[in-house]
Image (spheres, rainbow, N blue to C red):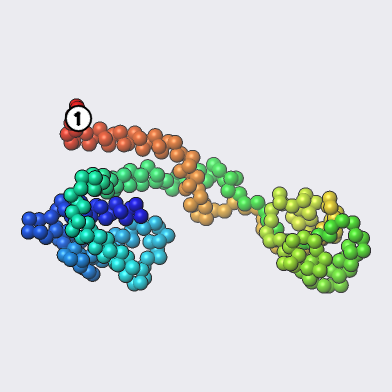
Amino acid sequence: MKALCCLIISCCILGSACRQQDGNSQWSQLNDGTRVVAHVGDLPVTEGDIDFYIKNLPEPYQKKAVSAYDRKRILNQLIFDRLLYLEGVARELDKQMDVRKDMRTCMYRAVAGPIMRELREEIYQVPPADLQAHYQEHKQDYRIPAQAHLRLIYLRGDDAQKLAEVKQSLAQGQAFSEVAKAYSADPSAEKGGDIGWVTADKLDARIAQKAFDDLAAGAVSEPVQVDKGWVIVKLIDKKDAHIPPLADLKTRVTNDVILKKRDMYVTRMQERMKILEDRLRNKFTVRYHNE
């Protein structure tokens, strides 16, 4: 809302400042060379205006604003902006000093924006060589540990009869998932004992040994006694530990490099801003006026 207000105020002030003596606004002449799709009074709305609006949306929304329906909604928003501008001029809001000051601030920031973006893009750019160097130095940080996809049956306590029934059911070929639903006290029972993919550090060490060292895919363990009962596990599948290639980690490694060098980037930004300010002070005259 604040940005929209700033846009509306900007339109009012610039429109007033550019108004010609015959009463027609030079805004009507600011055609960017693209097709004019609407006029509000003598103010045009072009395809380029719509494209510029989309360009300034957050990236996820830019990708969505491609349909004719979305462009029509944006067109209507731009028309509404110009209607508000015309109403503001009609009320002579553009002559109010506070409004003019706000507009001046918005104008300075708008014109300076591309220069600031150039500086940020240059400073926060991560060359491929830096990515590769960071990846090689910190490879182990990106290591994905071994994972096992398991089903389990948990029997609470030391009920020998129930344990015998479970072993017999499995030995007779009953599906592990059905036995889990019938006997397991674990929350995963309703999913047939499926606990998904897990790493060894998430399991009791005795169960982890069965899952990662002893069992082949599809095999079922002997009952394992744990602190508060018995557990039987079935190994559905297993993934070995690995380090993904840099291509799969590019975004993460880029962010890590930027975070690692953040303080350096801030310092470089300050240095470059100071150099730029000194150069511009030499190019343009700056005068201070004492009260």
30 and 128: which is toward the camera: 30
- Would residue 74 be seen by someone viewing this image from the given angle? yes
Left or right position of 225 against 41: right
Name the residue at 74% across, 52% down.
203
- How crowded pointer 1 is (Cα within 10 Å; few <14, some 14-19, many 20+) is rated as few
Helix, strand or loop at label 1? It is loop
Q: Position of residue 220 (x, y in %)?
A: 80, 63
Q: Position of residue 81 (x, y in %)?
A: 27, 61
Q: Position of residue 59 (x, y in %)?
A: 40, 58
Q: Residue furthest left?
A: 22
Q: Residue furthest front?
A: 91
Q: How many marks?
A: 1
- Would residue 48 be seen by someone viewing this image from the given angle? no
Give, as a three-letter code, the residue at label 1.
Tyr
5 and 187: which is toward the camera: 5
Residue 151: name its quadrant: bottom right
Name the residue at 79% across, 71% down.
178
Q: Position of residue 80 (x, y in %)?
A: 28, 64
Left or right position of 221 against 287: right
Residue 24: name its quadrant: bottom left
Name the residue at 46% across, 43% down.
258
Q: Which residue is mark 1?
A: 288
The quarter in which the N terminus is drawn is bottom left
Name the residue at 22% across, 36% down.
280
Q: Taking 61 as reference, is 96 above or below it?
A: above
Residue 233: name its quadrant: bottom right
Left or right position of 183 against 106: right
